Image (cartoon, coloured by chain):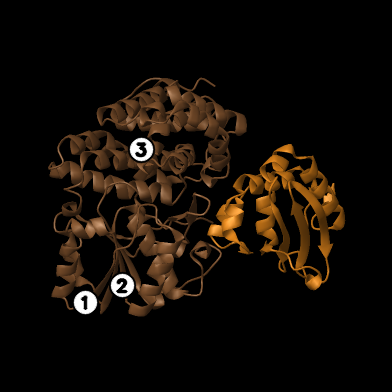
Amino acid sequence: MWTFSCPLIVYGDNALDYLAQVKGKKAFIVTDKNIVKLGLTKPVIDQLDAVNIGWEIFDEVEPEPSLNTIRKGGVAVGKYQPDWVIGIGGGSCMDAAKAIILLLARPELEPEALSVLETFNFREKARLMAIPTTSGTGSEATWAIVLTDTNDKRKLGLGTTECMPDVAILDPVMVMGMPPLITADTGMDVLCHAIEGYTSAWGTSMTEGPGLVATRRVFEYLAKAYKDGNDLQARKEMMIAATMGGMSFGNSMAGLGHSTGHALGAIFHLPHGRTVGMFLPYTMEYLMNGSEETTVKFAEMARFCCGASGPDKECAKVLVAKVRALAKEVDQPLSVKDCGVDKAKYEKEIPALVERSLNEVMTMTVTRVPGEEDLGKIFKYAYDGKPIDF
Amino acid sequence: MARYATQEWCDLYKEEINKNKAYEEAAKTWEGDFYFITEAGGPVKEPIYMYVDLYHGKCRAAEIVTDPNKYKPAFTLSAPYSIWKQIATKKLDATKALITKQSKMTGDMAKIMRYTRAANELTNCTMLVLTEWLD
């Protein structure tokens, strides 16, 4: 038994107008101070006001939200008792909204207990909406919640299938102002979700479709959105690609690019999309060197997304080269060194990077599962940008 | 070969865990005991409780318990026989079984998640026990 779930996806020009059709009395908006400052909550609030839905804003979400922030949000939502919880922002805000709505239903729980072990039935109280302001995490179309345990500087992968948003609104007006660097960082995250979702050992035909199409869209539109933030078509396509990437990996599982990238990001405090995107081609090469199954899938993607032809191995190499070329085009790092990480500090941390990667589920959901030694070598090669040859 | 969920099976499972260097390394700081519960149904007439005590990369005890009150383990993992069989033969991923609620766990999930590799090795150990299944 396995499942495929996704929200009602409202997309395209004026997608926020959907809010006029929402039934309810009170909305609890989960966001961050920057989103409020940029005025991105205003079009949502205006729509809610127009249909007499009351609202309250919780704007204390920080990047990689901590357990403590979620506790505070849980108390606030409990006092307000809304019938909608709306996450507006990037992955952090949307993940925080998921966690907070779970606490609305089960206020007695600690945030670290918001997992598949529990049942919440939060829809008896409220429904969940996600409005992304980046095109990256795909959080609007996944049930996953990533929180940070600040005590041991570790990311916690939480959530339950229940916390898939009911509605995701993809309105390009929310991403038009995204700066180029964030466009590139988050765009590489989309690519990683799409390729890893397509090739996941947990993948099925249901997850291959969105992964494949999202990959093609990223290759076609990320550089355009990066170079010209006002390119409406590119912004729209990247928003859709991000959501489709979420549908792909969220219903299968991400892979090695994520487990290695998570580890690097957690220890050296680098943006998620940048690190997972940087590791993606290295981990693809590692899979190609030992998994025929995944090589065939990379070849399929290369034929569909890059017009490649010929034997599987050659096509798979075209896909890896295309990933690196795109990263270069949008000024993303191609190696750990390019991320500005000091070599001596990095080498000292390799055992910790390996240990963290080994304990990520995403390391187990690929068709060639690396052990300690291979992971150590992947981290070493990635520092100087050396292609994986083992 | 040992019949599923007998003391003989537990002894072989304990042996496999204690021989597994990868598990020992991955679980070197783990402290926690389990009830692995096979729910009644199909060929299983009464629930079967298997107590497994894992400590610093070793298995200190693995026994079939007739009185579930004998221990108060930190974790319980329960599933029907058919699901256990699929997990033990690697036809079903243990994490997928949890996500789809085909199995149920109690205990500190955050702690378990820090030992994903060890959990995977524990499943690998079950594959190494030559098992006579009940069906």
**In what element is the residue under mark 1?**
loop
Identify the residue position indicated by label 1 in the image. A53
User: Quick one: SS at disc 2?
Assistant: strand
Callout 1 amino acid: Ile
Q: Colour of chain B?
A: orange
What distance separates the C-alpha of mark 2 from that of mark 1? 10 Å
Q: Amino acid at mark 2?
A: Trp
Q: Marks 1/3: CA distance?
A: 38 Å
Left or right of A380, for residue A197: left
The image position of residue B49, as x and y in percent, is: 77, 65
Secondary-structure class at tag 3: helix
Mark 1 residue crowding within 10 angstroms, few (<14) / some (14–19) / many (20+): many
A205 on left or right of A369: left
Going 12% across and 43% down the picture, which residue do you hit?
A: A230
Nearer-N-terminus badge (1/3): 1
Same chain for mark 1 and mark 3? The answer is yes
Quarter of the image with the N terminus of chain A in it: bottom right
Where is mark 3, residue-wise? A274
Answer whether labels 2 and 1 touch (C-beta < 8 Å).
yes
Q: Is residue B30 left or right of residue B99?
A: right
Chain letter behind tag 2:
A
Query: What is the quadrant of residue B15 in the picture?
Result: top right
x and y percent of residue B19 in the render? 79, 40
Q: Residues within 10 Å of mark 2 (few under 14, many from 20)?
A: many
Q: Is residue A229 visible?
A: yes
N-terminal-most mark, 2 or 3: 2
Q: Which residue is mark 2?
A: A84
Q: Dividing the picture into quarters, in which one does residue A47 lie?
A: bottom left
